[in-house]
Image: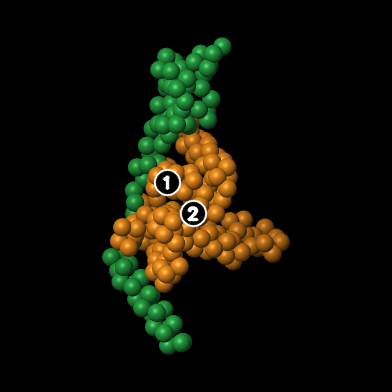
Chain colours: A green, B orange
Amino acid sequence: MSDIDRHLTAEEIELWAEGLLPAAGAIHLAQCATCLATAERERQFFLKLARLERLAPSDEFTEKVMEGVRIRAGTESRGR
Amino acid sequence: MRRYERPVFSLLYRMVRDRALAEDLAQETFIKVLNGITSYRAEYKFSSWIFKVANNTAIDYLRKRTVDTLSLDGAPDATTPEARARTALQLGDPGETPLEEVEARELGGAIETAIGRLRPEYRACILLRHVEGYAYEDIASMLDLPLGTVKTYIHRARNELRGYLEDRRA
């Protein structure tokens, strides 16, 4: 059986979802409904992860950080 | 700094799953970065450096917490069933505060819950790869791990996430 004829492994399906699958695997995928269905599930799974929201800290966040930087800078300059 | 606020805060929030604590750790991260800006080496990506500091800050906290906190099954020195029940952490406490409600809403989806169940090392790898879109090599450099280890962690994390999501569907 050639590389084009055999079903893809779980690792190869992951590679496909990441756009890293070698050509022989991609050709098989184009011809095999079973592997294509598994690959599509994997793609949906990757999409779900990629769409996780980037959550925001509170509005005072930057101010608090700059306060922390100033306090430390002040402490260090006094220590010299 | 604003450019990195959300990515860094999101990573930390998902690592520790506590909004107030994540904000403290994110502040600590940015203060360390800004105070140490002179030690930044231009051959590394600036974003990689920030995430490295953030991840180390989270891992340090999680290690400390593991030592300090009670187990879900009760304190280690509790020898009787009553003592174990008394000292165990109570999940699903009906007295949820408004902040806890926000957290439950933000991190309450199936995939967020599944991520919360991963080991911290797996969690950091999967978030940096899939949410932030970093290459395996960048993640290895950020987390000070061999490239093969990063690939293994991400592969295992995906398997665990898939397993958890499938169990929920079943």
Q: Specify whether B4 is left or right of A79.
A: left
Marked residue chain, label 1: B
Which structural element holds mark 2?
helix
Marked residue chain, label 2: B
Q: Are marks 2 and 1 on the same chain?
A: yes
Q: Position of residue A76 (x, y in %)?
A: 44, 82
Upstream in the sequence, badge 2 or badge 1? 1
Q: Position of residue B71 (x, y in %)?
A: 60, 58
The residue under label 1 is B134
Location of the N terminus of chain B (image quadrant): bottom left
Q: Nearer the viewer, residue B106 or A55?
A: A55
Type of the residue with mark 1: Tyr
- Per the model, the C-alpha gap separating discs 2 and 1 is 10 Å
Q: Can you name the residue that lies furthest to the left here? A: A59
Q: Position of residue A1 (x, y in %)?
A: 56, 11
Q: Can you name the residue that lies furthest to the top here? A: A1
- Neighbor class of circle 1 (other Cα within 10 Å; few <14, some 14-19, many 20+) is some
The residue under label 2 is B142
Q: Tell me: residue A6, above or below residue B160.
A: above
Residue, x 32% and y 67% (percent of image)?
A61
Residue, x 54% and y 13% (percent of image)?
A2
Q: Tell me: residue B150, above or below residue A19.
A: below
Q: Tell me: residue B121, above or below residue B50.
A: above
